[in-house]
């Protein structure tokens, strides 16, 4: 009976079974139009990682990111196996002094630079995006006092002193095209510097005026007290991690609550506190071929404040504590200050952030998505659909070793591959030229040490092209100078060189007038003075004079030192290596009046270059 029932159910089941429909196979993924594809690459999208992914780019824009994406047949295919693809890096604190600076930055994968102070004319010339250099987002002229930090570079810039001046000052920066406002609130006392600075009330007025015009306000600080004033003023960010003290819990909590960010600039801070970091960049074979000799020299230089080297510990501990609390740390270098260069120093900065306690992933976010968000750059900083294809391809996994970011395989700016090899060729050529200058014979008369005694009544020299007047008239200035060989005194034998002139007030701050000694065979030809250690001369006068040394390695910017004179002749010595690391390519030695408006006059004698 049971068996019959089961059989009946089975028959009934067969009779009632519905027709089985077979689902169609899933359609292949739709093809996304793209001209560039990165395939099988580990992608850091600015916040998190997507391993073994595909990234598609159409023109300047990222159009797809993910696994298993179909690559269009006509797209340029980049095999990313064993590589990491990162957003183009952003250096959140630099100073762009020449149009070549952002070009150099791009050669090291830095696709955007946040400029904290440059002349408006240069900022305007670099405002448009380009596939051949890093973008420059600039504050233009910084806000500082007469005699404050920012006025010491010989640039004529507007300043202010009172809260009532803040609104007009900010309005002028907006008219110039500044993308944000940089404010200086730092008297330099912690480092032994003697600057004036804006008071807290004026800082607050500047922040308010910036915010009223939809500008972010970033405050340069040196101490915790400066940072507390900036925080109270409502600043959006701090320029520099203060290094006098570690941030206390109350400051950290307030900074977190305010949404403030910090451009830490550990790269330049280590130049001041120990100088060790930049040497690792110079010696890294992954970077060295693209570092020009001037870059090598600047990385080897250190920034030692008058008060001596500060401790590194407070700044590193401050970065770690703020990061743990969720205060955004933005990777930044303060290039090109001593110990830093555009581009390469940001790659080193990532290592410093890891040393400070950030994970490699957080360090990369500090150089990509976080600065983009902090400065409202919504078109970059991430590898997501719709963002601009500013990309950096590196060999290896930065999660395991952050230094692999220095092993660059390819750089893309605005979706176009950037060829960094011309920079390597320029660097190699310059190194070859320097080798020739180093190997050049010294001037024939250098061994005799005496350059000029003036006793024959002429400007004759023991070697080189001799003495000539030098003034700012060659660049349109109106300063003047006269060189005359005169008797030393009525009852003294011998003759001396009298240097008299006038510094034109309208030509300041870049005015000069004095005597130029050309040690080469022709004016401005390099001479190998490496065999000499000291420039020695006798001088008399009142006030101060300036000694400047020009060299091929220094370009158009001389090194200088100031010397106080006395009414009677006294002997003065200048160590050449205090002015240039190695004097193998000296083009001019200048002795002239201090850059102060009005007349000057002094005399020199017995000029020597001593071994």
Image (cartoon, rainbow, N blue to C red):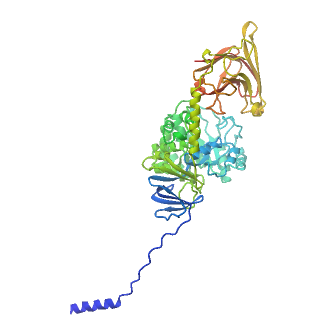
**Which residue is nearer to you in this view: 367 or 583?**
583
**Quadrant showing the N terminus:** bottom left
Give the answer, above or below, for where 436 lies relative to 485.
below
Give the answer, above or below, for where 399 lies relative to 524.
below
The residue that appears at 73% across and 24% down in the rendered structure is 514
Residue 608 is situated, as x and y percent measured from the top left of the image, at 64, 17
**Quadrant showing the C terminus:** top right
Give the answer, above or below, for where 489 lies relative to 565.
above
Camera sees residue 228: no
Residue at far top of view: 491
Residue 371 is situated, as x and y percent measured from the top left of the image, at 56, 51
Q: Is residue 457 left or right of residue 335?
A: right
Residue 577 is situated, as x and y percent measured from the top left of the image, at 58, 25
Q: How many marks?
A: 0
Residue 157 is situated, as x and y percent measured from the top left of the image, at 71, 39
**Which residue is nearer to you in this view: 353 or 233?**
353
Give the answer, above or below, for where 574 lies relative to 475.
above
Q: Quadrant of residue 76?
A: bottom right
The residue that appears at 52% across and 46% down in the rendered structure is 251
Q: Quadrant of residue 548?
A: top right
**Which residue is nearer to you in this view: 519 or 603?**
519
Camera sees residue 498: yes
The residue that appears at 42% across and 48% down in the rendered structure is 400
């Amino acid at each position: 009976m049971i068996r019959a029932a089961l059989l009946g159910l089975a028959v009934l089941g067969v009779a009632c079974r519905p027709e089985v429909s077979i689902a169609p196979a899933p359609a292949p993924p739709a093809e996304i139009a793209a001209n560039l594809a990165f395939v099988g690459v580990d992608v850091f999208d600015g916040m998190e990682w997507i391993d073994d992914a595909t990234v598609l780019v159409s023109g300047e824009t990222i159009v797809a990111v993910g696994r298993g994406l179909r690559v269009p047949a006509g797209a340029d295919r980049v095999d990313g196996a064993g590589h990491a693809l990162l957003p183009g890096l952003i250096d959140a604190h630099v100073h762009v002094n020449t149009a070549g600076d952002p070009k150099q930055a791009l050669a090291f994968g830095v696709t955007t630079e946040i400029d904290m102070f440059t002349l408006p004319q240069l900022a305007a010339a670099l405002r448009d995006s380009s596939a051949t250099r890093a973008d420059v987002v600039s504050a233009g002229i910084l806000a500082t006092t007469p005699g404050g930090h920012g006025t010491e570079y010989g640039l004529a810039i507007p300043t202010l002193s009172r809260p009532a001046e803040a609104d007009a000052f900010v309005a002028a920066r907006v008219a110039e095209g500044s993308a944000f406002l940089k404010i200086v609130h730092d008297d330099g006392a912690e480092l032994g510097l003697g600057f004036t600075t804006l008071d807290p009330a004026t800082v607050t007025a500047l922040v308010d005026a910036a915010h009223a015009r939809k500008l972010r306000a970033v405050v340069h600080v040196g101490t915790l007290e400066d940072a507390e004033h900036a925080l109270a003023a409502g600043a959006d960010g701090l320029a520099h991690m203060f290094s006098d003290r570690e941030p206390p819990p109350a400051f950290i909590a307030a900074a977190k609550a305010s949404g403030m960010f910090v451009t830490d600039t550990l790269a330049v801070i280590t130049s001041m506190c120990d100088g060790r970091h930049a040497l690792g960049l110079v010696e890294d074979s992954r970077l060295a071929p693209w570092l020009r000799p001037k870059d090598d020299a600047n990385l080897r230089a250190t920034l030692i404040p008058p008060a001596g080297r500060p401790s590194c510990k407070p700044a590193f501990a401050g970065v770690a504590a703020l990061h743990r609390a969720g205060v955004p740390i933005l990777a930044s270098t303060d290039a090109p200050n001593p110990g830093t260069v555009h581009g390469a120093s940001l790659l080193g900065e990532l290592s410093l952030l890891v040393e400070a306690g950030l994970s490699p992933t957080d360090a990369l976010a500090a150089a990509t998505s976080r600065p983009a968000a902090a400065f409202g750059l919504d078109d970059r900083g991430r590898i997501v659909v719709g963002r601009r294809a500013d990309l950096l391809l590196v060999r290896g996994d930065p999660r395991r070793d952050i230094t692999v970011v220095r092993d660059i395989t390819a750089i893309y700016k605005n979706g176009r591959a950037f060829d960094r090899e011309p920079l390597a060729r320029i660097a190699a050529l310059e190194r070859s030229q320097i080798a020739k200058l180093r190997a050049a014979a010294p001037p024939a008369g250098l061994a005799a040490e005496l350059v000029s005694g003036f006793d024959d009544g002429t400007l004759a020299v023991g070697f080189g092209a001799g003495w000539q007047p030098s003034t700012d008239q060659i660049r349109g200035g109106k300063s003047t100078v006269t060189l005359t060989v005169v008797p030393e005194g009525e009852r003294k034998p011998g003759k001396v060189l009298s240097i008299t002139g006038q510094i034109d007030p309208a030509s300041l701050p870049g005015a000069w007038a004095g005597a130029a000694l050309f040690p080469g065979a022709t004016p401005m030809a390099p001479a190998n003075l490496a065999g000499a250690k000291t420039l020695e001369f006798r001088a008399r006068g009142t006030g101060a004079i300036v000694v400047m040394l020009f060299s091929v390695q220094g370009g158009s910017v001389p090194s200088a030192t100031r010397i106080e004179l006395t009414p009677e002749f006294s002997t003065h010595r200048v160590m050449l290596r205090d002015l240039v690391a190695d004097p193998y390519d000296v083009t001019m030695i200048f002795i002239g009046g201090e850059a102060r408006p009005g007349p000057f006059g002094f005399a020199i004698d017995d000029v020597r270059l001593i071994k």
